[in-house]
Image (spheres, rainbow, N blue to C red):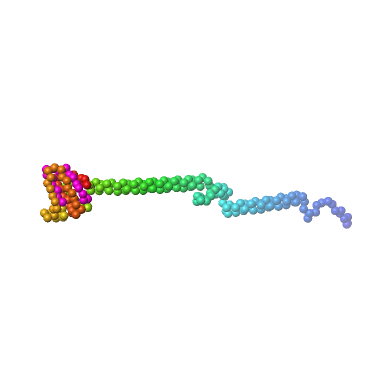
Amino acid sequence: MINPPVEPTDAPNPQTPTDAEHTAKGKTSRRWIFAAAGGILAILVVAAIVAGGSPSDATAASQCPTPTPCDKPSPCPTANDSCKELEKQLTESASALDQRAEELDQREAALDAREGELTLAEEAALAESFGAGIQLIGADIEPGQYRATGGSMCYWERLNATTGDFDAIIANDLPSGQAIVTILPSDYAFSSSDCGLWEKIG
């Protein structure tokens, strides 16, 4: 017995995907896209950190870099101002020392001049007054007329040499009171004892 042909029904075709399968495939594709994007972002972040350091380090470095010489502008004003203040203090100290050294030089020059004046005055005083002993003419005393208070033991002599010989005596005296003697430029020396202080009077 031959069966009659069967009419096609609305049953789904096995080869045609259903809505559920479309939804599942869409979710899977989106997961792969998100995963890939996250991986790329992570790679970029790691590369930025390796190349330039952390953001906080870069910010700190830009705010206060390595100190620079005072003649160059620095982004760190506090350090630069401190350096300039130190230079100013050193300059002022050097200027004060130079001024002090100049003052000391002037005082030293004034003292040298004063010492020279005193020496000349002392030499002049010694040349115009002297006591007992042998005085060389032109070296210790100058020729001229001298006077002494004298005394009972006063003795003086003009000499043409200091050999101690009797022939070296040009003139001598034993005054009993005041003594006055004229020393000539040709005399070599003058000697006296117990006559007191001789003073030049002419």
Which residue is painted at 13% across and 53% down in the image? 169
Query: Residue 71: x, y in percent?
Result: 51, 51
Q: Compared to 47, does 194 lie above or below?
A: above
Viewer-side residue, 29 vs 182: 182
Query: Residue 163: x, y in percent?
Result: 14, 55
Viewer-side residue, 8 vs 59: 59
Viewer-side residue, 144 vs 54: 144
Which residue is painted at 21% across and 45% down in the image? 201
Query: Residue 49: x, y in percent?
Result: 58, 52
Q: Is residue 201 magenta?
A: no
| Part of the protein shown in magenta | 140-158
**In this picture, residue 183 sits left or right of residue 80:** left
**In this picture, residue 59 sits left or right of residue 13:** left
**In this picture, residue 107 sits left or right of residue 133:** right
Q: Residue furthest bottom?
A: 2
Which residue is painted at 13% across and 45% down in the image? 175
Which residue is painted at 35% across and 46% down in the image? 107
Q: Quadrant of the N terminus?
A: bottom right
Q: Is residue 140 visible?
A: no
Viewer-side residue, 45 vs 90: 90
Query: Residue 4: x, y in percent?
Result: 88, 55
**In this picture, residue 125 sits left or right of residue 63:** left
Numbered disc total? 0
Q: Is residue 147 visible?
A: yes
Q: Is residue 147 magenta?
A: yes
